[in-house]
Amino acid sequence: MRLLQRETDGKYKLVEFFGKRPPPYAILSHTWGADDEEVTLWDILNDVVKKKSGYKKIRFCAEQAKKDQLEFFWVDSCCIDKSSSAELTEAINSMFDWYHKADKCYAYLSDVSKHPWIWKQKFKKSRWFTRSWTLQELLAPASVDFFSKEWKPLGNRNVLQKEIRNITGIPVQALQGTPLSMFTIKERMLWAEKRRAKREEDEAYSLLGLFDVHIPLIYGEGRENAFARLRKEIEQYPG
């Protein structure tokens, strides 16, 4: 696992914790904008993070982590070397666990403004609730803190559990931390049914942690084949 750390001069560095237990860290949940506007691992290594609009998310995560007395934080766009298929496979198979073990999870809703009268209506329609990857990011952490597009706190998963249940159809018990193995395979599949990802195979790969299974990634195999392999693994190791 790679974590980000902001240094005293305001620059960011990546610290590797492969094969050893990472220190306490915060983790970001967000929806991607254009790929070329998200900060990548290469951008961090070459100190060009401020040239992209996605830099604001990095800065926010660093500042919020500091408020929460956390030195390290994780952001998917720049903490994974996506040029390595082996690392990407390991990361996607480990991601549920990384979110679960995070000390803080910040869900940034880029389309929700904290207006006192209408923010809950915007919250219900947020793109964050329609994406495949954010399902595990909602359920895996011990807690989730939601933030508006102005970086203002909206509340945590516990405070907003009734609204989230109404939006997602996910039972309050699951939002409160009941082990996912207590819910049927059909129930968990239904939670993901209407969610979508940029790469169709990710609609299956994003569910690995919800069923506690592992499969290799084969981008290009198509959605149907990816789900067929996922279901086969679930049947073999139901959890």
Image (cartoon, rainbow, N blue to C red):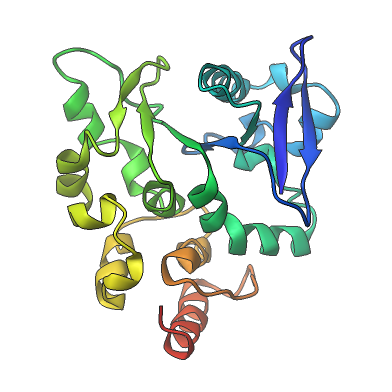
For image coordinates 62% across by 70% down, the residue present is 220
For image coordinates 66% across by 26% down, the residue present is 71
Does 200 sit above or below residue 147?
below
Asked whether residue 169 is in view, the answer is no
Does 138 sit above or below residue 212?
above
Q: Residue 175 at x, y = what percent?
A: 27, 50
For image coordinates 25% across by 38% down, the residue present is 158
- Asked whether, in this view, residue 190 is left or right of residue 91, the answer is left
The single residue placed furthest to the right in the displayed view is 46
- Asked whether, in this view, residue 73 is left or right of residue 201, the answer is right
Q: Residue 142 at x, y = what percent?
A: 40, 45
For image coordinates 79% across by 37% down, the residue present is 15
Does 86 sit above or below residue 79?
below
**Considering the image in quadrants, where does the C terminus appear?**
bottom left
Q: Which image quadrant for residue 170?
A: bottom left
Asked whether residue 20 is in view, the answer is yes
- Asked whether, in this view, residue 22 is left or right of residue 53, the answer is right
Quick one: 152 or 69, which is closer to the camera?
69
- Asked whether, in this view, residue 126 is left or right of residue 81, the answer is left
Q: Residue 194 at x, y = what percent?
A: 29, 58
Q: Residue 41 at x, y = what percent?
A: 76, 37
The single residue placed furthest to the top in the displayed view is 9
| Number of residue marks | 0
